[in-house]
Image: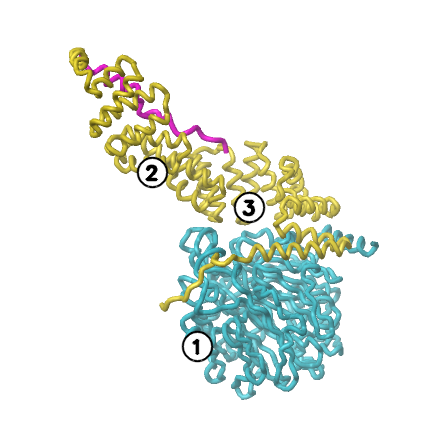
């Protein structure tokens, strides 16, 4: 009883103090973003059905991107998911929509190396995951498709090879997103795939219940349609995987509509847990039982439905420490007529929905949100929130509903207290672009210490938002090279302490919407030029501590 | 919404008594004398009896006249007059309907049949009749207004049954025909909002406010739509205006309370939601909203009480169940919490499951 009272009291105290996040920097510096996509040479159009009309959900959901350093030159490259049409998908494998791998030329431009690298996708691409599955120090690619997924092994010579069959990870369903982590801490990366709907391209829903929005006939679903279960593959360490979906308890037998996923150790017990955002069905928070199995604790933890008990759309997810308390918080993006949901991790496996007090809940409800991330865009030591928006029904524009198909993306600045500040209008022309955005990835593409953003735009070329930085604010990026842990140290907790401020970031493979971010852990340091203490808690259990680290560098830390 | 007056009597409703008098007064005396001599002719007999106010004989004779000379207009007119004099609505409507079939160019019959249909609640029939009349005499204001009324009443009937898709086109037509009819616009706005066509709904409410800013409930409805769109400042302003004009309308407090809640103004929200629940104690949404507010204010046992009541008032809604379950879990009532979560899950699955045939599938054609 005392414990329960204490629990209530702790939640109450947090609310009463309006959830202070960190020492505020006043006034907060606003980062400016410029769209350099076209100038950089990113001209691949992610085609998905007819741009004017999406008859079916498979055309309107779109896809994501992956950030990877495929040639290990220290500069982040970019992969863009390809898209497709129903006609080409029905006809079988096709070279019409290959996707695009862009090599970073280190001068603000990129070169399309898709053909040279042999990464063309013959199926309808939906999501992309960059991870080193075979621990050879080279980043591989896993493509989530409508149709068989594809695992591309990086050969180290600028090319990739399709090793799906040998690996045994070619899930044939509509896979929306994938994320990887070393769930059993055996030193290699295991693979989770979130699947969305069970689709027969020769028999698609055309009318009836759940086929209208605001009185307008639109693409049917997902409600009323058959969902697809998820897949989980354990890495055998020899280039092959074993499907342990059911054994691990991650198979989703109810067929909830999985759209986004991210790994994160939410209960700080040293092993990765998994969050799956499901569309219009309860989301799942799988706690790792550390015995090869997982238990869904989403409802109990307050992470399955909204604070008022509603099942939300669950399009994209970020699973990171927003308020620098050392615990991973949750942010899930949702459909229009609903707000995005921010939940702070209060410990003891409980999340508190702070959507309303954070100011997120008070925004107009016209946005339909997808890719998202917590990044310190102004390098002041506090993580901010970016959200990519775009509707799924092009019909919106024809009915004068003031809900547009193409929408502005949003940037919320963290000034150390609630409410978060919507600075979208002040953040430069890069935030004034109206497109139907989907996946968003966060990376330092020009290695200047400022987090840039690449956005997948449906039926359009991607946006590349280059962060112009904030004068006088310092940073550090931590690049991990593991020995005992998985090679890239995915799942490691990196902490940076400067004075009284301690920041934490857990490295990941997969998140946002159908996407994969820069694997380096970025921290803004404000005015600090020396880091008092930098700690890496490796997945293996080892810890590395460094003191007096200089700011403004990309630091490689080895296990 | 209060009920409008029924269709008719319209100022230009054909008044059969007046017309009848005119007919009779126009008959010259010699003609009357001559007609008496032709008493065997039922038509003449009928007219004569009518003039003498021998209604029984008149009705019999006029009916025989109709049977003998169905192509003559006059007996229809005279029977209409007779029935109206006697207040025999049904018979009046019947003979006018007959007359309408035979003499579709005779405006008087449209008015009679249409008005009768309206008073009898046969709004589809009223729409049909007045639509045809309006088509024939498009410049007749009275017919246009009658048609607008018919569409309005038909639309209201659908709206009251929550058949918003059916209601909307009739209300649209009512507005088109009677641009300044605030009843029509207000209810069209309601239908549009129910169809989630919120921006179109707001346009209708804007127009009502422009025409008659003190119209009861228009500020409430616009505020409710704005709240649904997340325009919270506007929602609070609108509903506050409604409360100022019309403080006795309980749903206003619910809508404003929810808007305050979403703005994190919990104390103000609670004041409104307390009132809403007091005035609408069996409204599950009000009780649930107050529960959420109480929970935010850490008045947890009261919140639990409200959630329990909300669940009992809306037993098929998984949302209050999930919320109550979570609160119970936090309070250590794990077993009850689990049971509620399970029940909520069952309800949720029911809500998103379709029966066979509810969604139609096809093989998409090539483009």
- Residue A181 in percent (x, y) is at 65, 75
Question: Which chain appears yellow?
Answer: B
Res B284 seen here:
yes
For residue A204, above or below residue B245: below
* Span colored in magenta: B1-28
- Residue A167 in percent (x, y) is at 58, 83
- Please, what secondary structure does the residue beneath circle 3 have? helix
Label disc, if present, on residue B227 of the rendered structure: 3
Would residue A64 be found to the left or right of residue B269 on screen? left
Question: Label 1 is found on which chain of the structure?
Answer: A
Label disc, if present, on residue B15 of the rendered structure: none
State the predominant SS element of the stretch in magenta. Answer: loop
Question: Label 2 is found on which chain of the structure?
Answer: B
Verify CB contact (< 8 Å) between mark 3 and mark 2. Answer: no
Residue placed under numbered mark 1 in the picture: A92
- Residue B214 in percent (x, y) is at 49, 32
- How is this picture coloured? by chain
Q: Nearer the viewer, mark 3 or mark 2?
A: 2
Question: Label 3 is found on which chain of the structure?
Answer: B
Crowding at mark 2 (Cα within 10 Å: few <14, some 14-19, many 20+):
some
Name the quadrant containing residue A472.
Answer: bottom right
Where does the N terminus of chain A fall, quadrant-wise?
bottom right
The residues tagged by marks 3 and 2 sit, at their Cα atoms, a distance apart of: 38 Å
For residue A262, above or below residue B81: below
Residue placed under numbered mark 2 in the picture: B128
Q: Nearer the viewer, mark 1 or mark 3?
A: 1
């Amino acid at each position: 009883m005392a414990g329960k009272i204490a629990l209530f009291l702790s939640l109450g105290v947090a609310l009463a103090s309006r959830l202070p996040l960190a020492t505020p920097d006043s006034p907060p510096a606003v980062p400016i973003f410029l769209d350099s996509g076209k100038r950089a040479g990113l001209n691949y159009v992610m085609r998905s059905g007819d741009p004017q009309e999406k008859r079916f959900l498979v055309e309107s959901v779109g896809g994501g991107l992956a950030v990877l350093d495929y040639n290990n030159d220290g500069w982040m490259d970019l992969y863009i998911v390809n898209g497709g049409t129903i006609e080409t998908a029905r006809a079988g494998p096709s070279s019409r929509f290959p996707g695009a791998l862009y090599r970073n030329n280190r001068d603000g431009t990129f070169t399309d190396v898709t053909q040279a690298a042999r990464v063309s996708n013959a199926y309808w691409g939906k999501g992309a995951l960059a991870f080193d599955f075979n621990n050879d120090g080279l980043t591989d690619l896993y493509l989530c498709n409508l149709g068989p997924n594809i695992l591309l092994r990086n050969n180290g010579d600028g090319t990739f090879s399709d090793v799906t069959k040998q690996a045994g990870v070619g899930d044939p369903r509509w896979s929306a997103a994938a994320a990887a982590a070393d769930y059993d801490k055996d030193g290699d990366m295991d693979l989770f795939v979130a699947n969305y709907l069970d689709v027969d391209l020769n028999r698609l829903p055309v009318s009836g219940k759940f086929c209208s929005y605001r009185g307008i006939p639109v693409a049917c679903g997902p409600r009323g349609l058959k969902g697809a279960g998820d897949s989980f593959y354990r890495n055998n360490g020899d280039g092959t995987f074993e499907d342990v979906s059911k054994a691990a308890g991650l198979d989703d037998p109810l067929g909830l509509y999985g759209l986004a996923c991210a790994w994160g150790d939410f209960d700080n017990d040293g092993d990765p847990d998994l969050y799956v955002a499901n569309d219009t069905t309860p989301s799942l928070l799988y706690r790792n039982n550390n015995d090869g199995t997982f238990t869904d604790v989403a409802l109990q933890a307050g992470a399955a439905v909204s604070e008022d008990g509603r099942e939300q759309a669950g399009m994209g997810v970020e699973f990171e420490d927003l308020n620098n308390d050392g615990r991973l918080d949750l942010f899930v993006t949702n459909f229009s007529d609903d707000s995005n949901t921010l939940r702070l991790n209060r410990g003891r496996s409980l999340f508190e929905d702070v959507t309303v007090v954070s100011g997120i809940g008070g925004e107009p409800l016209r946005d339909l949100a997808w890719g998202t991330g917590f990044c310190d865009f102004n390098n002041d030591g506090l993580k901010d929130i970016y959200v990519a928006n775009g509707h799924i029904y092009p019909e919106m524009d024809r009915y004068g509903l003031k809900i547009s198909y193409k929408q502005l993306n949003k940037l919320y600045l963290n000034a150390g207290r609630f409410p978060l500040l919507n600075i979208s209008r002040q953040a430069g022309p890069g935030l004034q672009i109206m497109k139907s955005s989907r996946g968003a990835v966060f990376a330092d593409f020009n290695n200047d210490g400022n987090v840039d953003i690449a956005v997948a735009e449906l039926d359009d070329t991607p946006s590349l938002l280059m962060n112009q930085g904030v004068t006088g604010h310092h940073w550090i990026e931590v690049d991990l090279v593991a020995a005992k842990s998985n090679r890239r140290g995915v799942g490691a907790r990196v902490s940076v302490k400067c004075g009284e401020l301690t920041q934490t970031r857990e490295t990941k493979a997969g998140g946002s919407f159908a996407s994969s971010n820069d694997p380096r852990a970025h921290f803004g340091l404000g005015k600090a030029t020396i880091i008092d203490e930098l700690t890496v808690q490796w997945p293996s259990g080892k810890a590395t501590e460094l003191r007096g680290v200089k700011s403004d560098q990309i630091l490689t830390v080895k296990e | 919404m209060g009920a409008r007056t029924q269709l008719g009597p319209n100022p230009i409703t054909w008044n059969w008594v007046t017309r009848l008098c005119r007919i009779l007064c126009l008959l010259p005396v010699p003609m009357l004398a001559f007609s008496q001599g032709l008493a065997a002719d039922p038509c003449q007999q009928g007219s004569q009896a009518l003039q003498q106010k021998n209604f029984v004989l008149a009705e019999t004779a006029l009916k025989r006249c109709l049977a003998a000379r169905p192509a003559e207009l006059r007996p229809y007119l005279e029977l209409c007059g007779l029935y109206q004099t006697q207040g025999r609505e049904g018979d009046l409507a019947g003979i006018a309907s007959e007359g309408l079939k035979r003499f579709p160019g005779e405006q008087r019959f449209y008015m009679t049949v249409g008005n009768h249909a309206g008073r009898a609640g046969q709004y589809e029939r009223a729409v049909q009749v007045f639509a045809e009349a309006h088509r024939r005499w498009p410049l007749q204001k009275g017919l246009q207004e009658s048609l607008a009324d018919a569409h309005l009443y038909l639309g209201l009937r659908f709206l009251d049954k929550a058949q918003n898709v059916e209601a909307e086109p009739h209300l649209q037509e009512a507005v088109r025909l009677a641009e300044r009819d605030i009843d029509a616009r207000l209810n069209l706005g309601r239908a549009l909002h129910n169809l989630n066509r919120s921006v179109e709904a707001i346009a209708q409410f804007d127009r009502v406010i422009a025409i008659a800013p003190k119209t009861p409930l228009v500020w409430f409805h616009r505020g409710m739509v704005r709240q649904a769109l997340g325009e919270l400042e506007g929602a609070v302003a609108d509903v506050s205006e409604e409360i100022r004009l019309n403080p006795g309308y309980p749903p206003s407090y619910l809508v404003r309370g929810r808007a305050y809640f979403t703005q994190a103004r919990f104390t103000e929200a609670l004041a409104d939601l307390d009132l809403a629940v007091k005035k609408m104690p069996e409204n599950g949404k009000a009780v649930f909203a107050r529960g959420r507010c109480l929970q935010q204010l850490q008045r947890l046992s009261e919140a639990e009480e409200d959630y329990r009541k909300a669940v009992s008032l809306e037993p098929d809604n998984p949302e209050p169940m999930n919320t109550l379950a979570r609160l119970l879990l936090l309070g250590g009532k794990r077993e009850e919490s689990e049971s509620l979560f399970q029940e909520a899950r069952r309800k949720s699955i029911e809500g998103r499951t379709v029966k066979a045939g509810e969604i139609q599938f096809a093989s998409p054609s090539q483009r």
